[in-house]
Image (cartoon, helix red, strand yellow):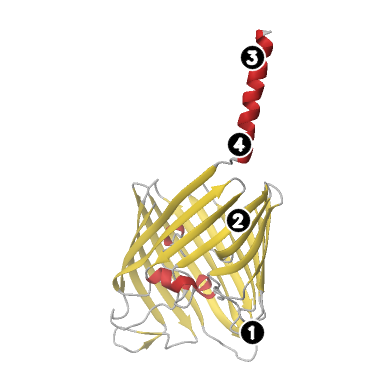
């Protein structure tokens, strides 16, 4: 009789705990982010020439701030939300002065894990296109590429992510048009798709191209571990908006010399096309970056960059103030992540 009572008590306790777990799902709250600053000087021009490479962010000489961002995440059971706030020149460049809450909100979305293989996300989220991202802590190179700078930074809309298998994934999205990150008054929408396989991603984006839209873009982003210490990242994209647009490709070989130091190169070719114009400008940009990690959280990045244009002899100014087709710079960046 005593054994029967004990078993009944164990069963009742287990049932009670199960009911508590189902009615009170585990709640998780986390905060992370980064702060960065840099020093930049031109090697082939005067620092007071008032020019830059023409890509997003890090366009100042001397000492300058990058951005600070705080990402707050909350999850309760199958649902959650993310709020990513940014400030500083890099944050303003990523969100625009006329954006949500005066350029402070980088991401703000809610999600629902409908099942183990399906997640719905609605709100503002960073783009799925391209190899590089806004936050410098997640990039190997401190400066950004032309491909990154010409693509969308963020979207406002609804997306669905599907884990088709252990290797295959699919994302489908309907969003406001390109760079319409607050309210769309045109009645138009954009559409996105991503097919992933073992860390390789084929991305598609489409809007009408009207009202400053992007048109159509196809993008490949991926990479391979060549060896235990050598990684090769790859990005290529083609954009077309009624017969004109851009194209380009970039490789990112990165070699780890030790647990704390890696060196990487970004070699990028980027150009413009137009059905009615021949010999439009194109650029080859080479960026060599070292990455030294101090106590896990602080990353020091020395970087040398050289951009050289074709069919554009007046892209920059040289040290004498004359027109030049190339520009080089040295940059030293400090990034703290938490």
Look at the picture and state if 64 lies above or below 112: below
Q: Mark 1, mark 3: which one is toward the viewer?
A: 3
Determine which residue is flagged by label 2. Answer: 111
| Residue 265 horizontal side relative to residue 163, left or right | left
Circles 1 and 4: CB distance less than 8 Å?
no
User: Can you give x and y, in whole percent of width and height, for residue 155 in the image?
Assistant: 57, 69
Determine which residue is flagged by label 1. Answer: 210
Q: Which sits earlier in the primary sequence, circle 2 or circle 4?
A: 4
Determine which residue is flagged by label 4. Answer: 21
Q: Mark 2, mark 4: which one is toward the viewer?
A: 4
Mark 1: few/some/many CA within 10 Å (<14, 14-19, 20+): few
What secondary structure is found at the residue carrying circle 4? helix
Q: Which mark is residue 5?
A: none
- Choose top left, top right, bottom left or bottom right for residue 57: bottom left
Q: Which sits earlier in the primary sequence, circle 2 or circle 1?
A: 2
Q: Mark 1, mark 4: which one is toward the viewer?
A: 4
Circles 1 and 3: CB distance less than 8 Å?
no
Q: Nearer the viewer, residue 169 or 253?
A: 169
Mark 4: few/some/many CA within 10 Å (<14, 14-19, 20+): few
Q: Mark 2, mark 1: which one is toward the viewer?
A: 2
Q: Residue at x 43, y 88 (%)?
A: 313
Mark 2: few/some/many CA within 10 Å (<14, 14-19, 20+): some
Gap between marks 4 and 3, in whole Å? 23 Å
Determine which residue is flagged by label 3. Answer: 6
User: Can you give x and y, in whole percent of width and height, for residue 310 in the image?
Assistant: 49, 83
**Quarter of the image with the N terminus in it:** top right
Q: Nearer the viewer, residue 207 or 156?
A: 156
């Amino acid at each position: 009789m005593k054994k029967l009572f004990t078993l009944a008590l164990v069963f009742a306790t287990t049932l009670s705990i199960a009911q508590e777990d189902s009615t009170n799902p585990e709640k998780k709250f986390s905060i992370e982010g980064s702060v960065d600053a840099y020093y930049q000087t031109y090697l082939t021009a005067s620092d007071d020439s008032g020019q830059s490479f023409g890509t997003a962010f890090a366009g100042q000489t001397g000492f300058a701030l990058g951005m600070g961002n705080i990402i707050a995440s909350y999850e309760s059971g199958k649902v959650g939300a993310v709020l990513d706030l940014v400030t500083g020149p890099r944050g303003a460049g990523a969100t625009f002065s006329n954006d949500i809450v005066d350029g402070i909100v980088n991401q703000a979305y809610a999600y629902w894990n409908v099942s183990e293989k399906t997640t719905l996300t609605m709100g503002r989220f960073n783009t799925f296109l391209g190899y590089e991202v806004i936050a410098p802590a997640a990039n190997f190179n401190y400066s950004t590429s032309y491909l990154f700078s010409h693509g969308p930074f963020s979207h406002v809309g609804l997306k669905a992510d599907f884990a088709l298998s252990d290797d295959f994934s699919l994302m489908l999205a309907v969003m406001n048009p390109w760079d319409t990150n607050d309210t769309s008054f045109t009645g138009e929408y954009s559409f996105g798709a991503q097919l992933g396989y073992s860390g390789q991603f084929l991305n598609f984006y489409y809007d009408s191209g009207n009202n400053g839209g992007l048109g159509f873009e196809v993008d490949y982003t991926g990479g391979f571990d060549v060896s235990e210490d050598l990684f090769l990242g790859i990005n290529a994209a083609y954009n077309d908006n009624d017969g004109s647009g851009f194209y380009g490709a970039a490789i990112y070989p990165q070699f780890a010399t030790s647990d704390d130091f890696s060196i990487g190169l970004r070699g990028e070719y980027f150009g413009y096309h137009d059905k009615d114009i021949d010999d439009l400008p194109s650029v080859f940009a080479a960026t060599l970056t070292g990455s030294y990690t101090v106590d896990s959280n602080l990353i020091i990045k020395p970087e040398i960059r050289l951009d050289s244009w074709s069919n554009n002899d007046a892209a920059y100014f040289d040290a004498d103030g004359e027109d030049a087709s190339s520009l080089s710079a040295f940059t030293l960046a400090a990034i703290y992540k938490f």
